[in-house]
Amino acid sequence: MWTFKCNLDLFKSTEQKLRWDEDVDGTKFEIYIPKWRVPEPTPPLTSIKIYDASSFDPQQQLTPSQKIRLSGEGFTETQISELDTWLPVRWNAEPHSDRPIIACVEIDRIHTQTVRYTPTGDPERQEIGQPYVPISILPFDYPRRLILRVTWVY
């Protein structure tokens, strides 16, 4: 699990999305969020929490055997409980909601210093764009699937 805060970067934003980023070990973690999903007023910071979701289906609640396996993979009981409250990952259709975003992403492309992930599900309903995750925070065998929780910080 990784947690960090990201700063709003209006200069790197697009017509449809706003960008938050953070320098992580000399490389930018970048996340774009569609403007329809960003609360008003626009928060200057986001808190991002990332879990490796390669060993379970984020569209389902965790089973007891999956919880045991996650514990064997080094997840703490607190992390497993927190993760279980996020599942199954569901789309939030409420525009400009200040509720946290919980999104599942899958590996798309490996770059020199980052790994680009693509949100799963219907492209018209995605609450985040493609995050660029610094290689320095990922294990060597890059996780094929991640769950991200984006919380707004004012």
Image (cartoon, rainbow, N blue to C red):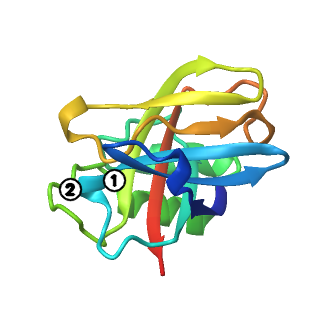
Q: Is residue 61 above or below residue 114?
A: below
Image quadrant assignment for residue 102: bottom left
- Give the label on residue 87, or none: 1
Tag 1's secondary structure?
Answer: loop
**In this orientation, does residue 2 appear?**
yes
Q: Nearer the viewer, residue 126 or 42?
A: 42
Q: Is residue 151 above or below residue 50?
A: below
Q: Amino acid at mark 1?
A: Leu
**In this orientation, does residue 62 appear?**
no
Q: Amino acid at mark 2?
A: Asn
Q: Nearer the viewer, residue 16 or 61?
A: 16
Which residue is rendered at x = 65% and y = 19% of the image? 110
Give x and y (percent) for residue 7: 60, 63
Q: Nearer the viewer, residue 91 or 52?
A: 91
Is the residue marked by circle 1 packed among few (<14), some (14-19), or many (20+) residues within 10 Å? some
Give x and y (percent) for residue 90: 24, 50
Q: Is residue 104 above or below residue 106?
A: below
- Give the label on residue 92, or none: 2
Is the residue marked by circle 2 packed among few (<14), some (14-19), or many (20+) residues within 10 Å? some
Tag 2's secondary structure?
Answer: loop
Give x and y (percent) for residue 138: 73, 37
Give x and y (percent) for residue 115: 64, 28
Image quadrant assignment for residue 37: bottom left
Which residue is rendered at x = 31% and y = 43% of the image? 16
- Give the label on residue 29, or none: none
Q: How many marks?
A: 2
Q: Nearer the viewer, residue 27 or 69?
A: 27
Q: Is residue 93 left or right of residue 134?
A: left
Considering only order in the chain, which callout, 2 or 1, is on the residue closer to the N terminus? 1
Which residue is rendered at x = 29% and y = 73% of the image? 40
